[in-house]
Image: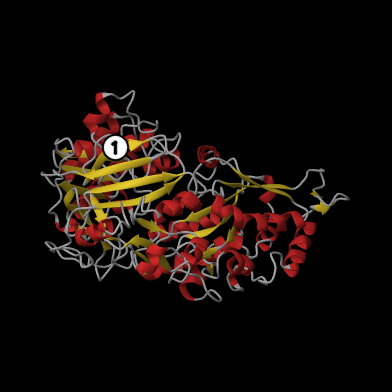
Amino acid sequence: MRSQQMTARTRAMNEGLPAPLGFVMLSVLMLGAMVLVLAGQARAEETIIKSHGFAEFGELKYPEGFAHFDYVNPDAPKGGELSFSAVGTFDSMNPFTRKGRGGALSSYHLESLLIESYDEPGSYYGLIAESLEYPESQDWVIFNLRPEARFSDGTPVTADDVVFSHNILLDQGLQSYAEAVRKRIPKAEALGPHRVKFYFSPDFPRRAMISQVAGTPVFSKAWFEADPENRRLDEPRLDPGIGSGPYVLDSFDINQRIVYRRNPDYWGADLNVNVGRHNYDSIRIEYFGDAIAAMEGFKAGVYTLRPENSSKSWATAYEFDAVARGDVIKDEIPDGNVPAANGFVMNLLRPVFQDIRVREAVQLAFNFEWTNESLQYGLFRHRSSFWQDSALEAKGLPEGREKEVLEALGDQIDPTILTTEPVMAHASKPGRPSDRRNLRRAMKLLDEAGWAVGDDGVRRNAAGEVMQIEFLLDSPTLERIVQPYVANLITMGIDAKLNRVDFAQYTSRRREKDFDMVSFAYPKSLEPSTGLYQQFGSEAHQYSVFNPAGLADPAVDALIDNIVKATTEEELHASARALDRVLRAKRFMVPTWYLDVNWIAYWSMYEYPENLPPYAPGTMDLWWVNAEKEAALKASGALR
């Protein structure tokens, strides 16, 4: 130690510092270096977890080496065709293009490092990766790729392909995605041909970082680099490229149909995560100009499986001979997922929606009860929460940990949120499209907000600007729902109109946030995480297509941070309930309807496992074709 002191003193004098001060400074530096060494040793000694999968909370259900998922039929026969419909158009087979519309299932040939289980939320198992390694801190993750993984052209899937895929999504992917991911995942590195490492920024919580990179699609680096000018990720193209998945593109006819066929050389056919899955020899999608034509196509057997999203069709369109004979089956399969948060979204970037009184008035103009009884055959339930009918739904007065989370926001939230029950979807009388009591209340709110009614019955603000609201649509099915709603807005003195445009124009205007109101459904899960930043966060609110409301609020940002930082389900649920309560209080969305079942109609040749999982109906990858039933349908003339 004495020799170290002498060296320090000598160095200090040589550098022109007073010896005592120089000695102190250098001693501090030496102490700091020792601390860093000790910290490095502690980090080096941190437990490294190596696993066949990853669970965001708790333990994985399936152990290493499991034979297959519980919800599959491991003996499901292979063969036959799945065919279903799409309404609209497509002009690209690149699903990531920023222009035009990608064809149905145009990303289906791509695989990820891990895949999600259908019977346990937030759990993932090895697909391209056979295992992963990460410290308890989750500061980084290493994926060990299966050496046998191959793209459809027979070339191996390597760590370089994974790194390339991560980077091209940052360089050519959606801006909101790229900006968020670049800050959170600063580096991806190939450690060897089959070993890839992702580093996570210390400035962000760890939860869902691993599952995010595990779910990134893996592209072929060689395919993109063979013609980089014509194979950009953000440009439309009819060549889908190559992937490593079980299906490849067979043929397509623009705006008519797309056919995918099973790859007979699919590398992963015998993996435990794929046993009993991917049972069709081909998958065909028939395109139709509108929903009516699509329904007629199903009745005629042009396609053979139909997930139904129209209550009118479900109630009235299946009264044809094939249903009566039992050749077509109407099935209601329970849905254990959180229902998507459906509703009519107001664009908060528009000045007309800046005042919450205006937003509440616009909400009050919608009559769910009349709509459901008169137009939807009473089949739906009214949604209030963003996490409806789940443990994440805010109910009653805030209490316990949820209350603490809200109190921590201070004056960032309306104090009444702490003392009142959460905002509920308003009730209306079902006897007529307009509920006079709600309309009177709405018009009073508009008066208070400074939008007075003129002699012509139209509302204007103090600057003389007319109150205008355009509802943008691309669906004739929704048009009949929205028209009575728009009529109520007009009754209130708003210059409201419904504008149904073609699919391409709608897609373009949605991306550019060029609308006042649209119909939208926020996907929701039982374990929400970083995706909430894109749906409700301030960071990309002006351009994120996932945040159609353009919502930007510091309290919401803080609550999303809490959710992402959660290390226990209890903390996650409390923070999610708090966020649900705050979002509902913002009144930027007119909540509409939801279902807790999947409506699926299909020709009777299809079969599925007895124990379907709670979080997916499995029509794409768990069902199969009974060849004898298919032959009987064709022999009878029911199917061509």
Residue 128 vs residue 569, the one in the foreground: 128
Residue 136: image quadrant is: bottom left
Question: Looking at the image, which residue is at 81% across and 50% down?
Answer: 458
Tell me if residue 378 comes above or below residue 411 in the rendering: below
**Residue 559 x/y as whole percent:** 48, 59
Q: Is residue 589 left or right of residue 328?
A: right
Q: Secondary structure at mark 1?
A: strand
Q: For label 1, count other residues whose C-alpha is less than 10 Å away and answer few (under 14), some (14-19) or many (20+).
A: few
Question: Looking at the image, which residue is at 88% across and 50% down?
Answer: 455
Q: Is residue 200 visible?
A: no
Tell me if residue 5 comes above or below residue 596 in the rendering: above
**Residue 144 x/y as whole percent:** 15, 48
Residue 321: image quadrant is: bottom left
Q: How many marks?
A: 1
**Residue 400 x/y as whole percent:** 48, 76
Location of mark 1 (residue): 251
Residue 634 vs residue 522, the one in the foreground: 634
Q: Is residue 397 visible?
A: yes
Question: Looking at the image, which residue is at 35% across and 33% down?
Answer: 233
Residue 46 vs residue 232, the one in the foreground: 232
Which amino acid type is marked by label 1?
A: Ser
Question: Looking at the image, which residue is at 63% across and 46% down?
Answer: 516
Single out the residue that lies furthest toward the front: 636
